[in-house]
Amino acid sequence: NRGSRDLQRWRGVVCHGHRKGVAAAHLGSTWRTGLITHGRCQLEYKVLAHPGKPWVVFLHGFGQNYRVFEPVYEKWEGCYSYLALHIFFHGESQLDGKQPLQMKEWAELVKALLSKMGIEKAHWLGYSMGAKFTLAAFQLFPQGFLSIALLAPDGLVMNNWYRLATRSVWGRLVLKILIQYLPFLRHIVLLPGKAGMLPKSLGRFAESQLLTRESRRQVMYTWLNFRAIWPGAPIWSRN
């Protein structure tokens, strides 16, 4: 798919000074796992530090984790230090309460984490859903950014189906019922998709992410709890 092709393309980007034969930063390297709690947010992160090297912050997409960036880690080994974040409802990252995550909460959490790590500025790489979290942090905390790269960005523009499912009480109720009680939800999405009534991307999403009850619930949690995370295009496009 498009995201995989983008990652493979980034795999070919070798940082300046990278030497042939340098050990790859694959998952056998010494990654350190950490947790930070700020307000009602708990964020899990992975760290692979190289003293004196600039930092890159990685944000994965839906249903993924820090491992999705392994091709990039391998090529940039020894050139950067890595800080990979697990988005809420992935890994050990959790969000308490019933209210959706707010932009300000996310920005404050990011600021607290960078302060804890002693990171003043970093390069940011957001993949798929991680792109909108990257831009949301930049919108309220631009001083923590050296650069931004987005791979197959998703969730930057609200489509009508997402608005219908998350922006009204009735829409959220219907979404919860479908997720919890209809094991054939993916087929509901696939049939109109094949008929050309829904975007092809939504059909592909249904095929890959709505296979199990657990994955369907993860969709519900992310859709409902992230509905307030929408970076403002006029702000981030100017910078």
Image (cartoon, helix red, strand yellow):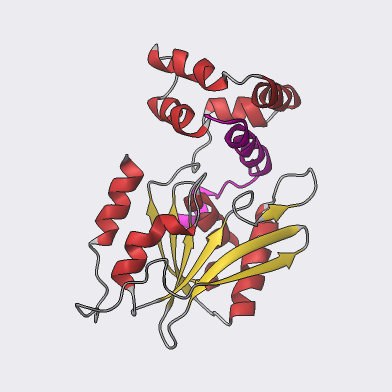
Residue at x 46% of width, y 43% of height: 154
Depth order, front residue of 123/176: 176
Q: Is residue 196 above or below residue 214?
A: above
Q: Is residue 182 above or below residue 37?
A: above
Q: Give the image location of residue 164, x and y in percent.
A: 62, 25
Q: Give the image location of residue 4, x and y in percent.
A: 32, 47
Q: Is residue 193 above or below residue 121?
A: above
Depth order, front residue of 128/44: 44
Residue 225 in the magenta stretch? The answer is yes
Q: Quadrant of the C terminus?
A: bottom left
What's drawn in magenta, residue-wise?
211-239
Q: Give the image location of residue 213, x and y in percent.
A: 62, 31
Q: Quadrant of residue 24?
A: bottom left
**Which residue of the protein is positioned furthest toward the left in this rendering?**
20
Q: Is residue 146 visible?
A: yes
**Which residue of the protein is positioned furthest toward the front in this rendering?**
28
Q: Is residue 181 left or right of residue 215?
A: right
Total numbered circles? 0
Q: Quadrant of residue 204?
A: top left
Residue 216 in the magenta stretch? The answer is yes
Q: Quadrant of the N terminus?
A: top left
